[in-house]
Image (cartoon, helix red, strand yellow):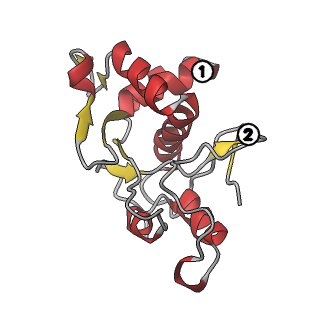
Amino acid sequence: MPINPSITIDVVQVASLALAPTPTCDPAIALEAQPDGRSLGQLLTEYVRTRDPALIDKIPTRPGQRMIRWRVSPLSPAAYRWAMSATGVDRLQRAFCAAVHSYVDADGHEVTASKFGPLDTQTRGMVLAPPEWLDHVQMTAGAALIDEMAAVALERAKAGPRALAPFSLPLGLDLLL
């Protein structure tokens, strides 16, 4: 089932840096688990392809831990053009600042970009998080998290509302299974 393109979706970090000595995905994920009679690899692969929020609750977590849920909003056409006009890391950071303005931490508390500075309302429906938000996220969760969430926002904008499973991981990130 396609994800409604006009709603904000919760996304969890399932990718890890390729060749990293230890996983860099959300540390709450129980990588040794066998969920619902299938392999964790199958579940995470399906989640990466669809980013179906219903699959988040099926991803096994370590006892007493919760995954951080990043709130990824759709990119407006203006935000998509603005992000795509940049290259490399700037493209991903622009997409992140335009699409991700909050997350729910592992304790269940919402953390918003507006706590780090005012949101910058641009023309044509584009709202940007302040640079301090980007700094906070990178210092808290790492640049790979920014890359993964930005990829979700960009691919969602590219694929359009009828796509069923348009997502993939950005270069340099992989599922460690």
**Count of picture labels:** 2
Q: Nearer the viewer, residue 118 or 82?
A: 118
Residue 84 showing in the rendered view: no
Q: Nearer the viewer, residue 30 or 44?
A: 30
**Farthest residue in the front direction?**
63
Q: In which quadrant is the C terminus drawn? A: bottom right
Picture coordinates of residue 155, whole percent (x, y)? 53, 44
Picture coordinates of residue 114, whole percent (x, y)? 21, 23
Q: Secondary structure at mark 1?
A: helix
Residue at left 32%, top 16%?
130
Residue at left 37%, top 34%?
99
Residue 138 showing in the rendered view: yes
Q: On screen, 142 above or below 68?
A: above
Q: Nearer the viewer, residue 62 or 56?
A: 62
Picture coordinates of residue 89, whole percent (x, y)? 60, 21
Quarter of the view holding residue 35: bottom right
**Is 49 on the left or on the right of 162, as rendered?**
right
**As shown in the figure, which amino acid type bears the numbered disc 1?**
Val
Q: Find the distance from the CA under tag 2 to the CA under tag 1.
A: 19 Å
Q: Nearer the viewer, residue 49 or 71?
A: 71
Which label lies toward us, 2 or 1? Answer: 2
Q: Earlier in the sequence, mark 2 or mark 1?
A: 2
**As shown in the figure, which amino acid type bears the numbered disc 2?**
Ala
Q: In which quadrant is the N terminus drawn? A: bottom left
**Farthest residue in the bottom direction?**
37
**Residue named by callout 1:** 89
Residue 20 tag number? 2
